[in-house]
Image: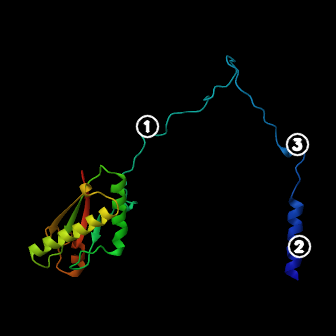
Amino acid sequence: MKRLLLSVLMLAVLAACGTTPTKEQEGASVEDRKPIPGDPGAAKPDAGISTKPLVDKPIAVNPLKDPGNILSKRSIYFDYDSNLVKDEYKPIVVAHAKYLQQNRAAKMRVEGNADERGSREYNLALGQRRADAVRQMMQLLGATAEQIESVSFGEEKPRCTDHEENCWWQNRRGDVVYQGE
């Protein structure tokens, strides 16, 4: 009951605060005034307005180097002895494929890598399978074969050189490198 009484009281207070517009408050009339040619008192259309740009050259942010853009992520990591692109890295591959699709002049190289376990020959072949897996996925998503080269470095370009699993996972990867970088 008290709540109902309080609600009614609040509505009454709010209603009392409202005002009805008077003749003076209804708004000013607007008249259409066009400048008369040759009138020295007529304002010039750009009088007092600067048309100089704030920046001399437009700032173009390269999406490939913008740390806030997914395209700045360039490594796709793989499980041990596997060349399947993990679900967590698929958005990176998709983003690069879309970039290539929208920028037909862009070219890249996918560099496959492996950890130190296994023979050199096996790791070169595994690195190639990893690079090819990324390349094929990008092609299925719209990039062309001419835009993507795949190579293998096997175990020759380790990111980490310790001899343990905490390090090896960093070496099981495919790296995306754009032409000119």
Secondary structure beneath label 2: helix
**Of the image marks 3 and 1, the number of the one nearer the N terminus:** 3
* Amino acid on which the number 2 mark rests in the picture: Val
**Of the image marks 3 and 2, the number of the one nearer the N terminus:** 2
Mark 1 Cα-neighbour bin, 10 Å: few <14, some 14–19, many ≥20: few
Where residue 165 appears, x then y in whole percent? Answer: 22, 81
**Of the image marks 1 and 2, the number of the one nearer the N terminus:** 2
Residue 8 is labelled as 2
Mark 2 Cα-neighbour bin, 10 Å: few <14, some 14–19, many ≥20: few
Residue 56 is labelled as 1
* Amino acid on which the number 3 mark rests in the picture: Glu
- Quadrant housing the N terminus: bottom right
Separation of marks 3 and 2 at Cα, in angstroms:
32 Å
Secondary structure beneath label 1: loop
Disc 3 marks which residue?
24
Secondary structure beneath label 3: helix
Separation of marks 3 and 1 at Cα, in angstroms:
48 Å
